[in-house]
Image (cartoon, helix red, strand yellow):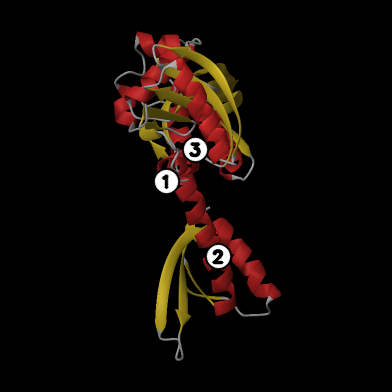
Amino acid sequence: MKNYWFEFRYGPNRDLMCKYSFSGYLVMVLVKLAHIAKNKLYVPCSGQLRINSFVFCIFFILILATRANCATNGNFRVMVIIPEYHISHFVPDPAGETEIIRILLENGYKVVDQQQTAKIRYNDEVTAAIKGDSQLATKIGLSHGAEIIIVGEAFSETAGRLVPGGFITCRSRIEARAIKTDTGEIIAASGKYASGLDVAEFIAGKKAIQKAGVELGQYFIDQFSSKMNNKNSNAKSSIDLIVDGLNYEKFVKFKSGLLNNFQEITEINQQSFSNNQARAEVNYSGSTQSLSEQLMSRNIIGYKIEIEEVTSNRISLLVKTTTK
């Protein structure tokens, strides 16, 4: 469905105007609203609509909601690597990868440049990551500044020939998993099938993978949105805390200080301690960013806190004692 330019006129003499471009799906919504409000909606020229202030208010709210959603999604930088094969042959400019990237961008995510991905798409490290080496996948994502890496494969093959017309049908499968690069956690994984039709076999294969890529891309959007909604809610979240600079005895006291000074922290589960570095899991009523800001603003007597790194699910601290 094509995009439309919306023209809004307002002011005492309706002499002020603003324009906004949006998809045809929203056109249908606005038409319904206009009918409900018993207002006239007319088309002065092709692809352009003038509507009244009532519908404009509804439309403006939708714009704000869309921008707010994009701003939230923009907290994540995603890397997508999905090599593509048609009957065991490498495929340049993979359609499945491109479709997933397009959907991520349309939903406000930042994505690693596909030209950077192309340099490593078919190398041994990516192959190993696709086969299940999540540690290597996180390494690839981190080296490109991504918080999430989507890695997988896409395949297509000939399914048959339709006569008359000489059309060729192809079937495809695309499968991938999304991994958080700071923890190695797999947050989503799925595979999709689709069919494509064309007079050229290679193009039919790409069409099939493209369709499957659209479905898989939307699946990841739904999964990421769910994760972000949980992250941004008031529900308790689990945050990895790395503390450097304290011996074991001082770390135990520092942990007690956190529990006493932060009502939002309900539990701290120590996971490991080695070479004056402690790793713990913190249950906190809020986001990782909120906790990092609170650590900087609140004073824990006897300790000086420096934040070394903050990711979507982890905070690294350098803690020094200010009293002997």
Q: CA distance from mark 1 to mark 3?
A: 14 Å
Give the residue pinned by disc 3: 288
Mark sitting earlier along the chain (1/3): 3
Give the residue pinned by disc 2: 61
Q: Is residue 38 above or below residue 278?
A: below
Out of 39 and 264, give the one closest to the viewer.
264
Mark 1 in CB contact with mark 3 (< 8 angstroms): no
Q: Secondary structure at mark 1?
A: helix
Mark sitting earlier along the chain (3/2): 2
Q: Residues within 10 Å of mark 2 (few under 14, many from 20)?
A: few
Give the residue pinned by disc 1: 297
- Residue 120 image position (x, y, % from top left): 32, 18
Residue 63 disc label: none
Q: Amino acid at mark 3?
A: Thr
Mark sitting earlier along the chain (2/1): 2
Q: CA distance from mark 2 to mark 1?
A: 35 Å
Q: Residue drawn at (44%, 37%), measured in percent from left and top?
A: 301
Q: Secondary structure at mark 3?
A: helix
Residue most toward the right? 36
Locate residue 263: give its quadrant. top right
- Residue 162 image position (x, y, % from top left): 59, 24
Residue 199 in view, yes or no: no
- Residue 184 image position (x, y, % from top left): 49, 20
Residue most toward the bottom? 13
Q: Residue drawn at (62%, 45%), measured in percent from left and top?
A: 234
Out of 82 and 161, give the one closest to the viewer.
82
